[in-house]
Image (cartoon, rainbow, N blue to C red):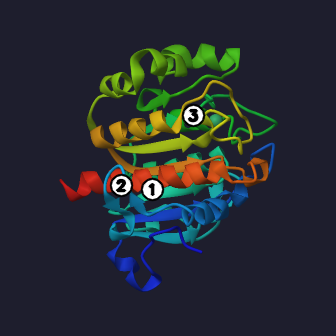
């Protein structure tokens, strides 16, 4: 099953955007995120592809769901590299646990396709090591910052970290935490982040949403965002920044409620990213 509105195999050359799933949960403590892409594709079929608030029919947009990419621990299996994909096509990766973002960013960064990373996440993910691995989802932003430079990382929506992580990130990373989002509002935070043409990777951990909106996650964190705030945040970032790739990670269908609300919301976020890409590119 392809993501709703995807071009067919025969028309894939027309695509401006690519969806690529990475069904990997090798670094998660609570397994199940490997089933995320399948559940999100299924959920996408339950939503109207006509985006009411934009009066936009998504299936008129040119995107292709190319299916799974295989990961082994912290690297792609032989022969799999995003660099071999068409770099002119903006990408959306569907996780998988958050650890997938590191090899994805690494591959793109090493090919000059990414300069900055913005993470929207309840967690800082800045541990040096977790459960005997440095490539855990709890370490992913630390590895990315070490690779691309701490000054090139922005985190939004954070409301959880260890004391050690906080001591490390408080002066080294631009963080707009959950409290700042509440005080300044999404519009205020988006204004402060500002504009920029650097190639940017936008990583969206679904657990930034409140657990009532996204219960199907490994590490639910109370006092999270609403989808009604997350969507304008994504819109504001993609309007102002040159987002060339994004991911939506940490949907764990095994922990979700029976109505699959976490997958539904993830599919809705992917719809929005596609619409934001389109708005930017079709009016450029
Ligand atoms: Mn998280």
Of circles 1 and 3, the one toward us is 1
Q: Is mark 3 within 8 Å of ligand 1?
A: yes
Q: Label 1 near label 2: C-beta < 8 Å?
A: yes
Which one is earlier in the sequence, the residue at label 2 or at label 3?
3
Classify mark 3: helix, strand or loop: loop
Mark 3 nearby-residue class (10 Å; few <14, some 14–19, many ≥20): many
The reply to whether residue 272 is visible in this rendering is: yes
The N terminus is located in which quarter? bottom right
Judging by the rendered image, the residue that carries numbered circle 1 is: 271
**Looking at the rendered structure, which numbered label has been put on residue 121?**
3
Q: Nearer the viewer, residue 217 or 20?
A: 217
Q: Label for residue 275? A: 2
In the image, is 273 to the left or to the right of 129? left
Residue at the location (60% across, 61% down)?
43
Q: How many other residues sit within 10 Å of disc 1, few (<14), some (14-19) or many (≥20)? A: many
Q: Nearer the viewer, residue 108 or 68?
A: 68
In percent of width and height, residue 88 lies at 32, 63
Query: Distance from label 2 to label 3 (Cα)?
Result: 21 Å
- Horizontal and vertical percent for residue 244? 37, 51
Residue 191 lies, with reference to residue 95, above or below; the image says above
Which tag, 1 or 3, sits closer to the chain's start? 3
Q: Residue at x 62, y 16 (%)?
A: 166
| Helix, strand or loop for disc 2 | helix
Ligand 1 quadrant assignment: top right
- Disc 2 from disc 1: Cα separation: 6 Å
Confirm or reject: label 1 Cβ below 8 Å from ligand 1.
no
Count residues near mark 2 (Cα–Cα under 10 Å), then give few for <14, some for 14-19, many for 20+: many
């Amino acid at each position: 099953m392809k993501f709703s509105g995807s071009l067919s195999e025969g028309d894939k050359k027309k695509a401006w955007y690519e969806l690529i799933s990475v069904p990997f949960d090798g670094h998660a403590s609570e397994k199940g995120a490997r089933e995320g892409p399948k559940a999100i594709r299924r959920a996408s079929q339950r939503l109207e592809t006509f985006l009411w608030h934009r009066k936009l029919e998504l299936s008129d947009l040119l995107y292709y769901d190319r299916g799974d990419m295989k990961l082994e621990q912290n690297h792609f299996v032989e022969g799999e590299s995003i660099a071999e994909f068409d770099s002119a096509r903006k990408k959306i990766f569907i996780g998988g646990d958050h650890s997938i973002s590191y090899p994805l960013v690494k591959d793109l960064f090493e090919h000059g396709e990414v300069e900055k990373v913005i993470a929207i996440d309840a967690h800082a993910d800045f541990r040096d090591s977790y459960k005997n691995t440095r490539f855990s989802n709890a370490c992913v932003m630390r590895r990315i910052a070490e690779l691309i430079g701490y000054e090139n990382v922005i985190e939004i929506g954070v409301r959880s970290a260890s004391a050690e992580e906080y001591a490390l990130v408080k002066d080294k990373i631009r963080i707009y935490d959950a409290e700042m989002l509440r005080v300044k509002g999404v519009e205020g935070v988006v204004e402060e982040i500002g504009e920029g043409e650097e190639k940017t990777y936008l990583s969206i951990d679904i657990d930034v949403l409140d657990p009532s909106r996204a219960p199907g996650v490994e590490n639910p964190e109370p006092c999270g965002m609403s989808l009604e705030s997350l969507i304008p945040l994504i819109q504001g970032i993609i309007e102002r920044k040159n987002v060339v790739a994004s991911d939506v990670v940490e949907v764990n269908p095994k922990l979700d409620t029976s109505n699959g609300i976490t997958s539904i919301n993830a599919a809705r976020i992917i719809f929005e990213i596609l619409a934001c890409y389109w708005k930017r590119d079709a009016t450029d």
